[in-house]
Image: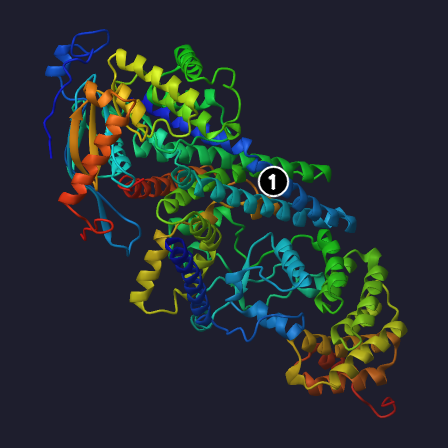
Amino acid sequence: MIARKLTIWGALAQGAILESIRRKDMYVAVILALVMIGAAATIGTFGVHGLEIFLKDTALNVVNLLSILMAVLFSSRQIAEEVSRRTVYPLLARPIGRGDLLIGKFLGAFALSALSLLLFALVAWGALACYGLSLGVIFLQYLLLRLFSLALICAMTLMLSVFITPSATITMALLLAVGSQTFGRAVMLVDQTVSPNVQILLRGVYVALLHLDFFDMHEKVSYGWKPVPAWVPTELFFYALLYIGIFLIVAFLRFRRQAL
Amino acid sequence: MTERLQTIACAAGILLALAGVSGVASHVGPIMEGGPTGISMAEQERVDKAASASLLGEFRSSTADFLWIKVDAYVHGGVAMRGVTQQEKQSGTFDKVGSGDGGKENGNREHRGDETTVIPSASHDWRGWYGNIEREVSPYQDMNHHTHKDPKEALPLFRLMTVSNPHFIPGYVVGAAMIARDHTKVDEAIAFLLEGAKNNPNSIEIAEEIGELYSGRYKRQYEAGMPYLVKAIVLGRGRDRTTLTEDEDEAFENAYRWAVLNRREAGDFAIARKVAQEGLKLYPEDVVCKEFLKEHPEQPGNAH
Amino acid sequence: MNKTKHPDVNSAAVAGGPGKNTAKDVFSGPPALQINGLNVGYKKSAFAPYVRVVHDLSLSVNPGEVVGFLGPNGAGKSTTIKAIMGFVVPEAGGINIFGHPAGSTQAKAKIGYLPEVALYYPFLTPLETMTLYGRLQGLGGKALYDEAMGLLQQVGLAGKERQFLKTFSKGMQQRLGIAQALLGSPDLLVLDEVSSGLDPVGRRQLRLLLHEIKEKGTTIFFSSHELDEVAQLCDRVLLIANGQVVDERTMDAALRGGIGSALEDYFIETLAKHQKASPTTDGDKAKR
């Protein structure tokens, strides 16, 4: 049973990956990463010793931004394009459930996002290495947490895509991915200024909100901090798993009754 | 039709969210009066002190501002700080930020006790697990008696700042102080400041800093330094003191102090006394002026 | 409305001819397709009124039968087929495929489906597409490869297995669609507008292929506007109009004769009778 499910999910993911790679989606992003990081690195003419932090910070910001963008773009079109192109019919005509389709597409989008992240990270690492700058072991932890966050973003975007149109999905997903930290900070600032009832409400919203900023360690990498203890990525892994489960379940509840 | 409705709904949602954040930010004091559009020190100070500025983080309107934040973040190891809110000021329940290795004299930014870390310590944090995680994944440490990272590595950023905005005075002043931490490079620091003076002829801080470097123990060129200290005093006299920023006010007071010390070392006690007396009128608690007048009181025969 | 069900006593399957279904299967096993009181509708948007497209539709297809599903444009053929495949959830009624509820994996395991508009992944090759669908079907390894290559050859795509589908014409994509519908030798073929996009050569090849499949005893349920092929292939035809089965008829020599003209006459006359008997306004809108 599990082997059969893995075969189904694997086949769906593989199809999504092949399509996307051949469509050359990632090439544009990699070129963009090269251009952006390269442009930042040209400031090295001012003397690179003072710009180690600046270069690392810029490079990792580019990696962050582009990887989020790619994850959202890959995920937003998985189900929506299948339906609009009508390729979903021969798929769902097979002995697979709609839940299998969702999971397979999620895995495909996540695999593509992970591949993009690794490519961007390679570009960043290469650009920094040209200046003799290294990122340290903490960079590996940064990549690991980034992978978790991409899985979250893929699941969240996939969920949104079964409710709203692709363009609205991309807008909402990017807003949530980029803006969650701002909202969290705002809640913390006003926590002492509001009435007890509103405080409870705000704290509840804070707890329920998905904190993608917890998966971003680029500042620690840039400023040369030591790696974090093992419990941090472990607990964040389970945190991510919880939200991925919620998003996929919500997506399934909506998708299973949708007329195609 | 459906797609149009959804797009409108999304746009409305975004506007509502922005309105919500603005509404929240507006309750956080001190109030930010107007956004930072330039680099005048008055606005820079207001921005630095506004807690709500931490919401939008590094959303600044100029490269110099952006780089200033980068350097500031660098010397503090990436630990983000913000101004305290009115409520925090009143209750005193916030994590204090204080320097353990000197202020501007060592090329560091002054911490005047009105800042706190964006990420609170565990004792001031209601978030439990969430707070523990954030303290691990983001740069965070107890900043009560923190030491600064060697800012030397950030010097090119100061150069960049002043290139992108020649009127960015902290870029010159703090940059020069950092250059001068290497005692063999005081001339380089002075040259940097002279360039700043050319672009900012009415800057009290730059004039005072030049005079201070000339008069300090690694140059001891008192005659060269005095004109700049006098210029700083004249510039300060010409301003309404209530309009001076904290940095300008501090530079004005320092100008008096260093002028007193300059003239003392040069053996010109009469001028030193006059400067000290004038300085005490404006800054009655100034220790340097008080001590000098105590050690060298006016006596018949030494008034000139 | 004549709803008498007549298994065609002359069909090879019933006579115990070559194929997998014997008379015993035909008369004792569950029907290949059973629809009872099906009601399906749509809402174009959240604020639009609910439009019922299929009204109280019932039909039955026995194993080994080839049944043509005919009707004018907008009659509800594709919607019925979508309901059979589980792509839409009926408002009311039940559909079973060999005793399994429509949309279940057990039901889908027995079906080979050709959609009305056959579109496939533009950046995959036919072989990769067949492999993908085959793996979802539970096939794999060399057996899947051999079957995929064999089917592609059968539908006239030999030599094009490794070309990207974005280079394929509509007709070629339709051929691929037929090939993928035949993957895994399904017990029931559900074909929606099977000849759409095919040139005359392709149509003939398809007809021959469907004959072969029919001889093997596979049940075929298909909709088509090509009355020629319906006349030549089907054991029975069902006529649908305005979301209801208005007539069904066993294909006899009279209907088969005249290269489809007799069937065409029957089609047009029956529909006209139905229109006179129950005139409808534009679109039969049923508010929920």
How are the colours assigned in the image? rainbow
Image coordinates for residue A219, horizontal then vertical, percent:
57, 48
Residue depicted at 67% across the width and 47% down the height: A55
Determine the chain carrying the residue at label 1. Answer: A
The residue closer to the viewer here, B211 or B188, is: B188
Asked whether the viewer can see residue A95, the reply is: no
The residue closer to the viewer here, A245 or B101, is: A245
Q: Amino acid at mark 1?
A: Val
| Callout 1: SS | helix
Mark 1 nearby-residue class (10 Å; few <14, some 14–19, many ≥20): few
Figure quadrant of residue A8: top left
Quarter of the image containing the N terminus of chain A? Answer: top left
Q: How many marks?
A: 1
Residue depicted at 50% across the width and 73% down the height: B30
Figure quadrant of residue B72: bottom right
Image coordinates for residue B36, horizontal then vertical, percent:
61, 70
Image coordinates for residue C144, horizontal then vertical, percent:
40, 14
Relative to C209, is C286 on the left or the right? left
Relative to C63, is A64 on the left or the right? right
On screen, B279 above or below C74?
below
Residue depicted at 53% across the width and 73% down the height: B32
Image coordinates for residue B136, horizontal then vertical, percent:
48, 46
On screen, A259 above or below C20?
below
Residue depicted at 35% across the width and 58% down the height: A203
Relative to C224, is C55 on the left or the right? left
Asked whether the viewer can see residue B243, the reply is: yes
Quarter of the image containing the C terminus of chain A? Answer: top left
Q: Which residue lies most toward the bottom here?
A: B300
Q: Which residue is mark 1?
A: A28
